Image (cartoon, helix red, strand yellow):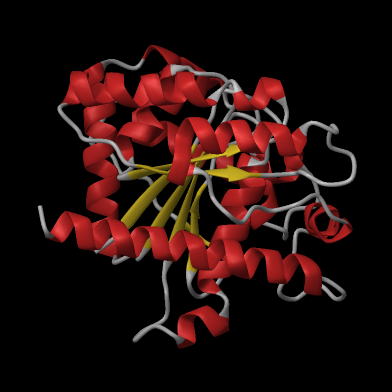
Amino acid sequence: MTHIIAIATGKGGVGKTTLCSQLAHYLTRPSTSKRATKPVRVLCIDCAEQASLSFLLLPEYDTYEDMNLEIEDQDGSYMLLDGSDALPIPIKCNDTLDLIPTAMHDFRLSDCMGASNEDMTKARDKVQKIAKTRLYDYILIDTGPGRGRVQYAAMLMADHVLCPIRLENHSASAVAPLIKNLEAIDISFDKQYNLLGIVPMSYGLRESSDSHYIAEQLEAAYGDYLFKNGLPTSKAIMAFHRQRESIWTIRNTQAVRANMEKLGKEFLSRLKQWEKENARG
């Protein structure tokens, strides 16, 4: 069974790409795969015009311009949403991690802001076909800021949605509109959504003094949806963005590894719980 997870919220700068990339590295690292009966295979789909996820997972390119020259003709995420029957071919990042990329400021992806319900349904079918034929265990879909049709389509493609937030008012206020979008998808496409959880991101010493209060308010409003474990701001995360190398291979990243281990275990536990509940019907 392939778990397809969209990482989405209407607010920019909350850590969607960081969460997506760190989950991908966590799931495919050797010590995680050892606990499975076979190597864990993950596909990341970059549905953000900024192409940050593509750049992070393709460190062989020195600049965005170099990357664009190589991948812009591969269509990537645009091919999922263009209404055609064509399937994008994933790029191999390593033995167990693949990527469907987008080029930075891909205007073709912007054109998909007008995607019809039929186009989005076809995109969902394409992702399901890719999952089935390539035998991925997890598909992680990164989305850009805003609440446009591309993010809407990404949530339709997924079985689960993760909502990363910063513990500050503007970010926290984006949770309710996201849930409304999920409810609209349920009505328009007869698809029951699963909000897997709300993940606190980028909190730390520089966060506002009322971050604990906001966390309490979120827990009161959304209860068990709020992850107990998040991913704090750290020098190691900043090093990851600079070096574009997994935190599991960067030196002196023990603290963020421990945080990611807790977050990853909670992520897997929530998926397992969903499987049990879904099996019972």
Residue 26's image quarter?
A: bottom right
Determine whether, in the image, residue 262 is placed left or right of residue 132. right
Residue 132's image quarter?
A: bottom left
Total count of labels: 0
Vertical comparison of 49 with 24: above or below: above
Determine whether, in the image, residue 10 is placed left or right of residue 273. right
Determine whether, in the image, residue 80 is placed left or right of residue 187. right
Rendered residue at 57%/45% (across/down): 199
**Quadrant for the N terminus in the image:** bottom left
Residue 12's image quarter?
A: top right
Q: Is residue 76 visible?
A: no
Rendered residue at 28%/26% (across/down): 120
- Image coordinates of residue 108 in percent, x first then y, are 49, 22
- Image coordinates of residue 137 in percent, x first then y, are 35, 66
- Image coordinates of residue 204 in percent, x first then y, are 83, 47
The front one of 26 and 276 is: 276
- Image coordinates of residue 52 in percent, x first then y, are 67, 41
Vertical comparison of 144 with 263: above or below: above
Q: Is residue 102 visible?
A: yes
In the picture as drawn, the residue positioned furthest to the left comes out as: 281
Rendered residue at 51%/75% (across/down): 95
Vertical comparison of 58 with 209: above or below: below
The front one of 224 and 106 is: 224
